[in-house]
Amino acid sequence: MKRQMHLIPVMQTGPLVGSWRHPEAEISFLDGGWWGSIARTLEAAKFDAIFFADALTFYNDEMTRKGGDIYLLDPVPLAASVAQATTRLGIGITISSSFLEPYGVARALGTLDVLSKGRMAWNVVTSVSDQEAQRFGKPKLLPKDERYDRADEMVESCMQLWDSFAADAYLADRKRGEFIDPDKLKHIEYIGKYFKTQGPLTVPPSAQGRPMIMQAGSSERGRQFAARWAEILFTYQRTEASMKAFRADMDQRMAHLGRAPEDCAILPSIQVIIGETERIAEEKRQYLYSLVDDDVALARTSMATGVDLTKVSPHQKLTDLDVGTGSTGALDVMVNAMAGDNLTVVEAARRYSVNALCPELIGRPEQVADQMQQMFEQWGADGFILSPHVMPSSIEEFARAVVPLLQERGIFREDYEGTTLRDHLKQGSR
Ligand SMILES: Cc1cc2nc3c(=O)[nH]c(=O)nc-3n(C[C@H](O)[C@H](O)[C@H](O)COP(=O)(O)O)c2cc1C
């Protein structure tokens, strides 16, 4: 069998910049049945998983009013509802390591993993705003490196808790009157700098043992964290050279920790816009961008880059931007990435806020499949994180028009071989 790609779309439980105002968009973020039907579409197309990104607060009034970048629902109960609507599709949810206690996180995720019969993944994020910290009674976030130290302890202690309940400890033997064999439970004591907890956990292991770990570290410390724990790794890479460099760096970091490259699938983000012709697809793209509010785009991009772009002339060329000492790595990335496109500040901000500058694959379904195949075979990607735009039609279109082409080419599964998310990630891997 040929090597197979993995496909996971990233969802959010609310609008992302302008696409929710598209006439085709459904605005049903609060409807569990709607999420169930999207999940079933993905399952019918044999996607590896659905993935819910998350942030714990709104950004500001302007973004809230205009539907800039909104997360309405808590992913934990949402995952339970999606699990109920599906039988094979993996379910990735985001939980920050910066605010909760490990015992609660391990118990909630362990329960979801049991109820979904081994289909859960945990996207471990360390959070980015002090406002999120304040909701949990803390004045501000820890510095970034310390947030990752805390995340290390969070995942380490959750692993020990998940490990503390042996699969054969659960007996439920009516005749002998024995329910659990306590000798097979591990009494653990975790004492770290940030957390103290004890096991055993009350939740038995799932069909895949424990939830998988997903992560998207890109800083030095973030990559180190990912190398230690991630089994599914997301990344933004715009070129073959940068993807190869990222892959080589991660493979090396993992090797130092005794992990093999195939222990972690590396999935770059892409945005796909399909049309009957290339021209129609390009027009759809232009239309989508026309829906993005300039103030939202500038605010969203300012937050991501740490430079206040609302203070500069939005129509000046990006390359003429002089941000002086305020410049950050993220802004340099944006300026460099878009230098060749001759964009104004606001045009660049629109792109950044729609898809964080991930590669845009635009054209007929065959053209999109060609580009995906090339990135999969030559860039060293193990598959893709798809950023949908109009919901749910962009997902449905992709499932109908592109997935069959990838299947014909033998680079995407025609059916699931196993039942758990871990099974799906192993299928046809490197
Ligand atoms: C596809 C993708 C999805 C992400 N989802 C979230 C998310 O839901 N919530 C969040 O706080 N951060 C999210 N992030 C940001 C990462 O967790 C991480 O902070 C970012 O990639 C920067 O890496 P660093 O923390 O090492 O600097 C996501 C990143 C990517 C590439």
Image (tube, rainbow, N blue to C red):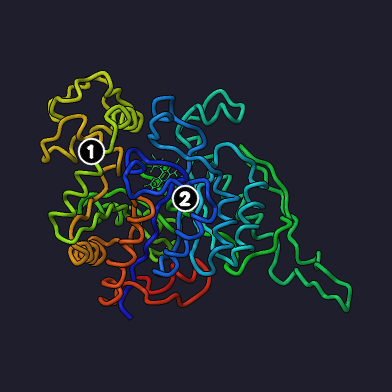
Q: Position of residue 347 (x, y in %)?
A: 19, 34
Q: Which residue in the protein does label 2 denote?
A: 52
Identify the image quadrant of residue 305: top left
From the viewer's perspective, is residue 11 above or below residue 178? above
Question: In the image, 279: left or right of 13?
Answer: left
**Dot in front, 2 or 1:** 1
Q: Earlier in the sequence, mark 2 or mark 1?
A: 2
SS at badge 1: helix
Q: Position of residue 413 (x, y in %)?
A: 37, 74
Q: How many marks?
A: 2
Q: Nearer the viewer, residue 169 or 338?
A: 338
Q: Position of residue 34 (x, y in %)?
A: 49, 55
Badge 2 residue CB within 8 Å of ligand 1: yes
From the viewer's perspective, is residue 286 above or below residue 184? above
The residue at 71%/55% (across/down) is 201
SS at badge 2: strand
Q: Which residue in the protein does label 1 denote?
A: 290
From the viewer's perspective, is residue 117 above or below residue 289? below
From the viewer's perspective, is residue 111 above or below residue 317? below
Q: Position of residue 361 (x, y in %)?
A: 22, 55
Give the alpha-carbon distance from disc 2 to disc 1, as whole Å: 26 Å
The residue at 63%/66% (across/down) is 206
Residue type at mark 1 is: Ser
Residue type at mark 2 is: Phe
Q: Is residue 317 visible?
A: yes
Quarter of the render that holds ligand 1: top left
Question: In the image, 334: left or right of 427?
Answer: left
